[in-house]
């Protein structure tokens, strides 16, 4: 039987990141080529995590090219798994995304290796105590990939610049444009040549927002036939970004006035650098006191180094600052804490200070010992600058639970809790609708990357404006062109 891709049709298959926000992956199938767009890690409980990330609804060896939009793990995190299972092609992305993946993918490998070790420990304990063995797939197969395997996958990466047209395969030309989402993130155009016909597909997953600190605004894609669009906040609106800086200023001033410490649990990629940028601005404006600031996360420190080396990807204001020899990531009061001893010594320092530490959701990392040492005192502040998922310690702090558990011990939460929601890197409902109207795809929009209620809300809004759109399900295929 002849396969579909030998006929004169162009199709897109929605492999993952539909009806949910993790595991983004899509397959463009033309008569001459198969192009994978993103290979994100699907997040779920261990068994589902292993199964979903190792089940492929296509033949890996047949993929001609992988196009990577950005370094977030839900878009890039399954690349080492694919390479382990037979993917042979090159991976095209921007140089900043490659540099970030060089840190993010091994970090993801490390998390999996540690989880595997933990499972092995439990299973050995069960065996010794005669308890029935729990057969978790991870304890049988090992981690999806190790740190070493993740690092090796970087040799497949081929960097391209924004605006550079690149012939990906015989019939597909790729161009990246600035997505304004995180450093190096792209919205993508794929031009498919079918004899005399040209099909132009746009991909904006994820799409940033206007006026984010550090980044340029998202690029409007032109002359599209179709647009694949994210819908993370398809039914919600963000507070203006200026509100973040204002709330940060108020919280720092209030806490320093009562001689307290400000603990900021922060994601290593983008959010940490944004917070540093705002604090630097506030210091220069003289609207906060000259307190010491510590970045206490080895990953965030390394990622900030990537930011320093990729200033050309950033907004003109940042480039101008750097030209004036005034890097927003290096200033007098700012210290990057490198070892654990230095990290622990901050507990004995009773001066008011700002500590930015990971992990973002307070599930692991050095932020835990800073929380343990500071949340019981009402003079201190926990400043939340990112999304906290259900059941995480971060969410319990946001919910201001009276008692929280850290390393198995109970602590009273007496510190002030301030939540800043204005720093999201995703377009909100209005941004998404405006983006669709500006790009004006001639044939339709596919809505992906959103929880169902968010995607549906955007679908209804677009539909009511007369814009043709679809909400594909996992493994659905859509016909884009037929001759
Ligand atoms: Zn993203």
Image (spheres, helix red, strand yellow):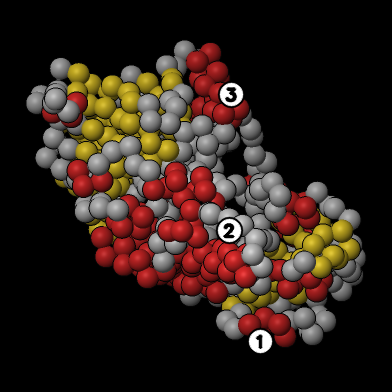
359 left or right of 139? right
Q: Earlier in the sequence, mark 2 or mark 1?
A: 2
> Disc 2 versus disc 3: distance between alpha carbons?
45 Å
Q: Is mark 3 within 8 Å of ligand 1?
A: no
Residue at the spot 19% in from the left edge and 43% down from the top edge: 62
Q: Which mark is residue 457?
A: 3
Q: Nearer the viewer, residue 276 or 32?
A: 32
Q: Secondary structure at mark 3?
A: helix
Q: Nearer the viewer, mark 2 or mark 1?
A: 2
Residue at the spot 33% in from the left edge and 26% down from the top edge: 477
Compared to residue 473, the image places residue 411 above or below, namely: below
* The quarter of the displayed image where residue 374 is located: bottom right
Q: Nearer the viewer, mark 2 or mark 3?
A: 2
Is residue 160 in view from this perspective?
A: no
Marks 2/3 in contact by CB < 8 Å: the verdict is no
Q: Secondary structure at mark 2?
A: loop
Residue at the spot 79% in from the left edge and 85% down from the top edge: 348
Residue at mark 1: 341
Compared to residue 33, the image places residue 211 above or below, namely: below
Residue at mark 2: 133
């Amino acid at each position: 039987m002849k396969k579909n891709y030998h006929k004169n049709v162009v199709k897109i298959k929605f492999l993952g990141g539909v009806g949910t926000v993790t595991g983004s992956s899509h397959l463009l199938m033309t008569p001459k080529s198969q192009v994978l767009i993103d290979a994100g890690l699907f997040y779920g409980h261990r068994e589902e995590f292993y199964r979903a990330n190792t089940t492929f609804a296509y033949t890996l060896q047949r993929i001609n090219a992988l196009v990577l939009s950005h370094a977030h793990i839900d878009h890039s995190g399954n690349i080492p798994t694919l390479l382990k299972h037979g993917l042979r092609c090159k991976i095209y992305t921007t140089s900043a995304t490659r540099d970030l993946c060089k840190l993010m993918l091994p970090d993801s490998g490390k998390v999996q290796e540690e989880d595997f070790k933990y499972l092995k420990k439990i299973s050995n304990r069960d065996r010794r105590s005669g308890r029935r063995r729990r057969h978790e797939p991870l304890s049988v197969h090992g981690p999806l990939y190790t740190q070493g395997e993740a690092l090796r996958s970087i040799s497949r990466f081929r960097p391209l610049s924004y605006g550079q047209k690149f012939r990906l395969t015989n019939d597909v030309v790729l161009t990246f444009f600035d997505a304004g989402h995180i450093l190096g993130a792209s919205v993508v155009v794929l031009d498919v040549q079918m004899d005399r016909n040209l099909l132009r597909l746009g991909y904006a997953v994820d799409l940033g927002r206007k006026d984010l600190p550090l980044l340029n605004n998202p690029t409007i894609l032109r002359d599209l036939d179709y647009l694949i669009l994210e819908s993370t906040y398809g039914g919600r609106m963000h507070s203006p970004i200026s509100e973040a800086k204002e709330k940060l200023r108020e919280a720092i001033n209030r806490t320093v006035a009562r001689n307290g410490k400000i603990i900021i649990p922060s994601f290593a990629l983008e959010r940490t650098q944004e917070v540093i940028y705002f604090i630097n601005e506030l210091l220069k404006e003289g609207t906060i006191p000259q307190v010491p600031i510590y970045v206490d996360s080895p990953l965030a420190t390394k990622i900030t180094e990537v930011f320093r080396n990729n200033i050309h990807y950033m907004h003109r204001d940042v480039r101008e600052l750097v030209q004036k020899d005034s890097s927003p990531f290096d200033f007098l009061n700012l210290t990057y804490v490198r070892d654990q001893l230095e990290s622990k010594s901050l507990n004995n320092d009773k001066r008011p200070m700002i500590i930015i530490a990971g992990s973002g959701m307070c599930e692991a990392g050095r932020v835990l010992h800073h929380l343990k040492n500071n949340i019981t005192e009402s003079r201190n502040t926990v400043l939340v600058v990112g999304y906290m998922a259900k059941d995480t310690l971060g969410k319990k702090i946001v919910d201001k639970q009276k008692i929280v558990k850290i390393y198995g011990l109970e602590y009273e939460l007496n510190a002030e809790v301030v939540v800043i929601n204005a720093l999201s890197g995703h377009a909100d409902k209005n941004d998404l609708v405006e983006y669709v109207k500006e790009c004006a795809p001639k044939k339709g929009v596919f809505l992906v990357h959103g929880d169902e209620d968010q995607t549906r809300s955007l679908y209804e809004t677009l539909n009511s404006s007369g814009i043709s759109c679809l909400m594909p399900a996992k493994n659905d295929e859509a016909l884009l062109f037929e001759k």
